Amino acid sequence: NAGVTQTPKFQVLKTGQSMTLQCAQDMNHNSMYWYRQDPGMGLRLIYYSASEGTTDKGEVPNGYNVSRLNKREFSLRLESAAPSQTSVYFCASQATGGLSNTGELFFGEGSRLTVL
Amino acid sequence: AQSVTQPDIHITVSEGASLELRCNYSYGATPYLFWYVQSPGQGLQLLLKYFSGDTLVQGIKGFEAEFKRSQSSFNLRKPSVHWSDAAEYFCAVGAWKRNYQLIWGAGTKLIIKP
């Protein structure tokens, strides 16, 4: 059972470099999310995708872009990394629709990014 | 506006003692409520959820939570904690904004004393 898979798990960047975090889910979920987690601040939503082909901004979208490549994959791109983007990034997926669905999120194990 | 408050940033409990983690929410309709646990260096795992019916819900690892509408609370409890319960615990409420989303509390870090 793979669930939600994120790559890479660790990354160190220099200021101004770019990179893409990859996320894939094998649960046929419609919705996918990118969060960042910083000490004392809980989870903050960066972007989400309610369905294939759609994306929307969350609380903290500045400095990030996303692509919902297909139903399985949702990538997060940092075009020009800044030290303020040092964080742990989590991808999550969610089944939506149906009377019994309560909107539970399934999380990947996280990607730890350091920007020097 | 919808919000979730976890008043305790840290809680320290002796191994074998009982535990209660507090969660208060603000939401206009009947909420869907969740507790997640995050072990060090890991992702978040669902402990339990409430969406209707019995207000006392049982979860994994011996945890339970009680929904109290009058108090807008969904506190997490465990009768006897184990050292392996040391983790961070997050409460969340499901809410409709432009789409259905989870609104998160800031988390409570549980420290277990031997």
Image (cartoon, coloured by chain):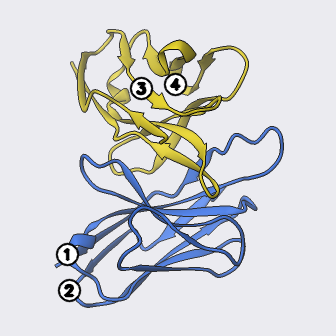
Mark linked to residue A15? 2
User: Please, which chain is the residue tagged with disc 2 on?
Assistant: A
**Contact, CB < 8 Å: mark 3 with mark 2?**
no
Residue type pointed to by label 3: Cys
Quadrant including the C terminus of chain A: bottom left
User: Label 1 crowding class (10 Å Cα cut-off): few <14, some 14-19, many 20+?
Assistant: some
**In the rendered image, residues at marks 3 and 2 fall on the same chain:** no
Q: Chain of mark 3?
A: B
In the displayed structure, would residue A1 be above or below residue A49? above
Between circles 4 and 2, the one closer to the viewer is 2
Callout 3 secondary element: loop
* Residue shown at the point (66%, 61%) measured from the top left: A31
> Disc 4 marks which residue?
B61
* Front residue of B69 and A17: B69
Task: Supply the letter of whichever chain is blue.
Answer: A
Pointer 3 residue? B23
**Residue that mark 1 sits on:** A83
